Image (cartoon, helix red, strand yellow):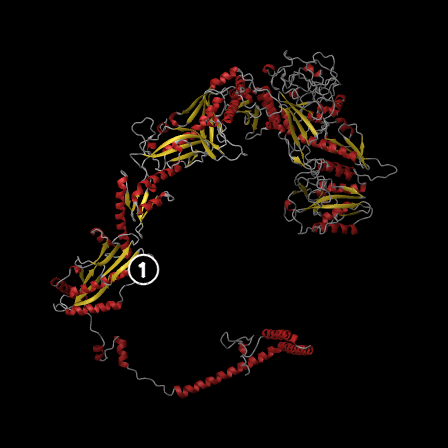
Amino acid sequence: MAPTPLPLEQMPGASAGYLPAGQEGGPRINTMSMSVLIDFIIQRTYHELMVLAELLPRKTDMERKVEIYAYAARTRHLFTRLNALVKWGNSVSKVDKSSQIMSFLDKQNMLFVETADMLARMSRETLVRARLPNFHIPAAVEVLTTGTYNRLPTCIRERIVPPDAITPAEKKQTLLRLNQVIQHRLVTGKLLPQMREFRIRNGRVTFEVKHEFSVALTVMGDSPNVPWRLLDIDILVEDKETGDGKSLVHALQVNYIHQLIQARLVENTNALSEVYNCLHYFCQSLQLEVLYTQTLRLNYERLDDNNITVEEYVPGVKLTVSYWRDLKSELGYRLTVQSDPSEIGRPLAVVHVPSLGAKESAEVADRAVRSDHLSMERLIVHTVYIRSVSRLSDLKLEFQAFLKDVDFNLQGTPAILTVPVLSPCLRAEQIHITIDTHTGMFRCHVPKHLDCPITDDMQDCLNGDRSKLPALLSELRYWITHRRCEKTLQHLPATAIETLPFLTLPEQELLQAGRHKIYVKLHRHPNIILVVQLKEKSAMPNEMEYTFHLGFVVFQKDESDVVDDSAKQLVSIVTQPPSEIPKFYTKLMRLIEFDTFVATHGPGTEVDEISPHKRKSNGDILAPPAKQQKTIFPAYFIPELAHVVAMCDEKIPFLNLAQTLSKHRIPHSGLQVEANATSLVLKILALPKPGTNQAATATGDSKPATAPASSTSTAMPKIESHVWDDLMRRVLSISVRSQTNKNSQVRIWVVEFVFYSTPLQSTHQKEQGNRRTVYLTYEQANHDFSKTVEDLLNDWSKIVYLYTLVHDFSEQLRNKRLSLGDMLVVKSYSYVNLLLGYGPKKEVTCNIYWSVQSHGFRLTFVGGISAVNAHSMMRDQLAQHLNQQHSLTSIAHILHETYNPMSSIAKLPVLPLLGIPRPQVPVLSFCMLPQSPCLMRLTYQAVYCLELRFRANRLVSIRDGASSRFERNVIEEFTPIQGLKAFLSKYVDESAVYRGRAPHDDDNPLSPMGMEDNFGGPSSVAGVGAGGSSPFLGAGMRGPQSPRDSGLRFPAPHTPPSSSNPHTPASPHPSAGGGGSSAQSHANFNLTSPPAPHMPHQSPGGLMPSSPLNPQPSPHMVHSPGPNTLYMQSHQDSPFTAMSPANNNWPGSPSMPRPSPRPGQSPEHKSTGGGGQGVGGADRGTRGTLNRPWAGAVPTLLTHEALETLCRPSPHPNKDINVADMSPLERFLGCVYMRRQLHRNIQSEETLTALNSTEPGVVLFKVDGLQCQVMLNPMHMQSLHLKVTQLPPMPDKPTFQLSPDDLLVIEQYFDTRVAAPPYRPNALHSICRLLNQPGHVLKDFVQIMRLEMKPELGGDQLKWTVQMCMRMPPSALPIVPIGNACVVLGRMKILFFLQITRIPYNGKDWKDSPSLVLPIVHDIGSNVTQVAERREQIAPSPMMAAASALLRRFTDFGVQQNQCSLFPAITDLLTNLPLTTDLPPPPSNQAIGPPVGAGVGVGVGVGVGVGVGVVGASPNPMMPMQQLQPQVGHGPQLGPNPGGPQ
């Protein structure tokens, strides 16, 4: 059938439709989706192909070909048809549209036909019989108007409508009348006693018999002949255990009983009795049935036939159940539930065999049968309970026969009989006897000791022969006592055991085999055994008596092992070497019996014989307080045993220690009990003087005294007799006690020394009273009491030796003339340690104590809150000085005088640095090497050495430590510091150095010979000078004196007064005939050869007081700090001319020294002298002398303030060099080191030519066309400067001439980038290699330097800033090792590294700017500049590749003829290098920031400079940089592409 066309409204795209929504475009009939069709075709093709694959192998070749051809033809035909169908599908929309129009027209036609048919059918069939009814208008009017209809027939009312109900009043009156009738019938009739409980209500009477039934009756009239009418029956019998809450009687059974009783009520005259009899018999039978069912269920589910069995069951009559069938009894144990004939109502009763009392039997029935809960289980349980109580009561009587005055207890459910075996006894320790409810057998146990082996025997005895019961109770009593002993010793250092491994049993009767004793092994005393004998009291068997014996044992491995008599001593501790065979067997040596009463009733002992639960309260004076009287020991605790064990454990160490003290001949008072029984104490009466070997005299076999740990033998302090007597008077008592460490639970000895006050008054809060205590602790774990006594004597020596120092020091401290109280404060003196506070705020401390190991005094230094204690570095030297001098006053002066200089020295950095001299080898910047308390050597980078001597009057002398003090040679390990004297002279303070000099002495300067004192030499520390024992104390503790004082003698001058300048060094040769100089000459002079200028010189005594630090003082040669004015005047074209002192442009530099006899002023002090000698020949001689190599060997005196200025970090004097703060001394030594490395570099490089210079300290060399001069800044000597001069051109060889501006850029770059901190010599290698380049190449490098120092010269078109790397940074390609010089020359090529940084834009910060290190290679011959690439590198970074491509493009198109391509290529790179997103962030070890230009506002153009600095390995020696303000100017733009994009 053709598909029905859809209406036009249902076609897609129709504007409106006439069909309901959802019916447009319905599915076509017999249509298929194109995808399904294609799927079918593919599946069919695949299926046929798989069939061919399975069938063709079994056919011949020709058949296979035919089948394959047929398959191909069919498939081709099928897909051809599919192709035609697909092509036809392009025009199918028109066909669908036509079919939809036809379908719509057919449907419209069908609607018209159906409408006509329906109208015809209605007119012919439906409307023919249609008629209107005759309406009942009267009825409608009546209903609508009145709401009722009264026209119905009356038969309906009579037959259907019921009559009206009676009123509530009539109903109430009727029920009251009916109640009266029922009450009358009950009064006049016969009523059984069981039915006396009833209630009349609402015309009915309800009878209720408890636990059986409830019945309701009524009467139907008031006539006496009207029978009772049964209304309701309710059965009250329930089964709450097995009934599951359901009714036991079915409703049909209740109806049957109801009909039966109602029938009997009509005929019977005694109707109510008939009702009771019927219902009572039924309910009683039902109860027996319930009990029987419960018994069967108990027997089936929980109990077996051996426990409970139904012997007889007669329904409705009785039920007999037997139990405890395992018990052997004649009658057996059973119970019977039946009617009780003795009572009127014949209720159920329980009959027991054997019989129980009437009271118990009735109680059982009431509990189990006559109750709401009818239960056979409750009946049996209660019966078993009564039986158990009866049997236990009989057993109790048996126990009372042999246990008198014992409180038995029978209670609980199930019933338990408790029998105490000891007195007192815990309930958990009593014997609990009960009866098994299932079997009726006796069961007994001890709850606290469930593993007791005696309870099984006792249980068998209770169920069998009871004659053994007393013996078993006695054994149990001993067994429990053993357990009590173990429990008592649980928290004591002892263990209770029952036997000991004896090889041969001892002869003592006590130690024979038996169970009535225990052995107690003391953990801390393995050779001592406590034997506790147990015995029952005859009068009270339940009470135990304890007898204690102390046994001394030794251990054997076999019978042949011989034990010496020394093992019998109390002190002896028998130990065995680890290599021997273990000794398991025990041998008893001695056995001592304790008097129990004496042992437990000593001083303060509260163990009482009467009862351990009570305390004495009958007026005993020694009784504890009332709160302690309430203390009750638990019954399992045996106080006698605990006390004896504790007494042995505590007293045995004291006895061992007392015997050891007696062996060392140390008197003591024996073991005592302290007041109020607080502890045991051993009083030592006196201790020997240290140095006397008491043990050696006592035993004669002690070990020799241990040699001091120090290699240098020091004399032991001498103990004067008056000092010893004073100490003995202060010692009040020496007590030895024993305590337990709370943390480690180890017992320790506590020795208490009580002293009367101290000779030193300290500021400590706890040291203000007259009673001073010292506590010393020693461990007891090793059992080596000889070592404990030796340790005590060693600690006593600490107290004595320290007291010898303190005794003398206290007298000097009270002497106000010495002013020791202003120098220090005694913070604490505890007889063992002396804590001194000193310094400006007295907050740094020095702890002095005696060391037994080193046999000398030791010092420890601790810093304060706001200050560090720099004396820690010379702790050993101070200790050696104290051990030699034995004077605290000397140490106090040394600490006071050296605190400030040591604090200044401590500010110098001591961190290891890399790159000096090799990049991978760390070298310490400064290293402090103390030689003596007042002599210190200070090394710098293991190259230079300074020798510092601390002198009195706040002065410090500094000399070059490379110069030997004993020979003319230089120490091999160090190098002399050139210019040290001139540098130090700038910090000399004349007012302090020349304090006390007479005016006429200025014209007579002495020779520098003797400027060195003899303190600090090889023999000076141990020796005592003429001025006293301390380098800071004069003879007789005198203060500074005037040079005119007759007490001081000046040595004769060695040189004539040829010059009035005291800074001019005199002749180093002393006069041979100086009579006064022989006594003051240096003790270590080698007089076989003429003294060298660097050897020690004498100093006058008018500068400082006479002391070992300066025994023979003389004038000190202090040199002028002024600059080399002759050099400045001869170099007018130098860029440093404007920085001369006359212009005062150097920050922090001193002014020009004016003519004065004393021109040596500190840089921080202005000159105060007026007119005099000008700058002339004398000054020239001074400068020449100061820069001599041997000038540093002559000491220079500086004040503490000057040394602080020298060592304290401060900003760089050249403000253009922005680096971290560094001390002036480190900057000076760094510059000298850099100058030395430059000199060595010049000698090693073939391209550099060294030139001779007349100026000392100036490095002069030349390169191709340039002469370079490197010198220290003459003003402050803390920076290196380069002076570059263009050499005149040679006639035969033309040279490229650099402009003066280019030379100035090279000098500024050297000052701020190469020779600036951190000082790395490899940067000098790089700059020297750059200076040796041809002139046109060097010109471009100068342009790069200028662009680095002044980034604003690049203008706005530069996107990147540039920095030249003088050393290899770690972020670059590993072409050159890190830290080495990164300018490499070879084969007319130069390799160098540039670090470029992106200028921030769009509001970005410098820290977010990417940075890149580029290796650049410039070929001088071919004039090509490109990026260096390693051959093994596979894929360079995107930025590196972009830079390389940009330089190659510039080489191809941008190079101009007769022009070096280096700077134009770099400029093009900085201008046009794009920023790729693939560039990684800068490494973490690089600090990104803008660079610092050489000057501010010097360049032209507009721009903002940026740069990158690498911490530790930056491309130049600059530290973190600061951003410059944009410099605005007008001028031509540099670079080949001035108009490039920004």
The location of residue 858, given as percent across then percent down, is 57, 25
Residue 346, quarter of picture: bottom left
In the picture, which quadrant includes the N terminus? bottom right
The amino acid on which the numbered mark 1 sits, given as a three-letter code, is: Arg
Local packing at callout 1 (Cα closer than 10 Å; few below 14, some 14-19, many 20+) is few
Residue 1314, quarter of picture: top right
Q: In the image, 212: left or right of 1440?
A: left
* Front-most of residues 501 and 1528: 501
Reply above or below: 1373 against 1229: below
Reply above or below: 232 against 55: above
Q: Is residue 320 visible?
A: yes
Q: Is residue 1308 visible?
A: no
> What residue is shown with label 1?
297
Q: In the image, 1480: left or right of 600?
A: right
Q: In the image, 376: left or right of 71?
A: left
The location of residue 581, given as percent across then percent down, is 52, 35
Residue 1146, quarter of picture: top right
The location of residue 913, given as percent across then percent down, is 67, 36
The location of residue 1393, given as percent across then percent down, is 73, 44
* Front-most of residues 1106 and 54: 54
